[in-house]
Amino acid sequence: MWPRDRAVDVGAKAQILAEVRALAASGKAIVYVSSSMPELLEVADRVAVMRAGTLGEARDVSAWSEASLLAEAVGT
């Protein structure tokens, strides 16, 4: 989700995430953009980080932690 989703209540957010999971389970490809690292790690199978206009390599979600996502995003 994007920072604009801050107005989305917890129940609606859970419903949105359930729908995203259902679409993915049915074989649909999902491009999910979020600044919430815990949310990304919960919902994604693979994660790629875009920094300074360059998209990094997509890796299995198990290869990431919140700390490694942040380090990749800021370039450290």
Image (cartoon, rainbow, N blue to C red):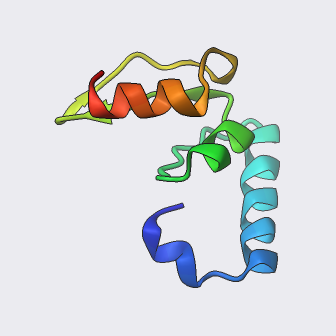
- Classify the position of the N terminus by image quarter: bottom right
Toward the viewer: 15 or 65? Answer: 65
Instruction: Where is residue 45? Give x, y as percent.
Output: 68, 28
Left or right, 48 with reference to 26: left
Total numbered badges shown on the rendered structure: 0
Please identify the quarter of the rendering in which residue 75 is found: top left
Question: In the image, what residue occupies the spot 61% across and 38% down?
Answer: 29
Query: Residue 23: x percent and y percent?
Result: 75, 49
Q: Is residue 25 above or below residue 12?
A: above
Of residues 67 and 34, which is closer to you in this image? 67
Q: Is residue 57 left or right of residue 1?
A: left
Task: Work out which quarter of the rendered image holds the C terminus and state it.
Answer: top left
Q: Position of residue 18 (x, y in %)?
A: 82, 58
Q: Does 27 appear above or below 23?
A: above
Q: Pick the residue in front: 16 or 24.
A: 16
Quadrant of the image occupied by residue 61:
top right
Q: Residue at x 67, y 37 (%)?
A: 41
User: Does 75 appear above or below 4?
Assistant: above
Near-viewer residue (28 or 33): 33
Give the residue displayed 57% in from the left and 34% down from the top.
66
Residue 34 image point, x, y percent: 50, 52
Q: Looking at the image, is 46 positioned above or below residue 30?
A: above
65 sits to left or right of 19: left
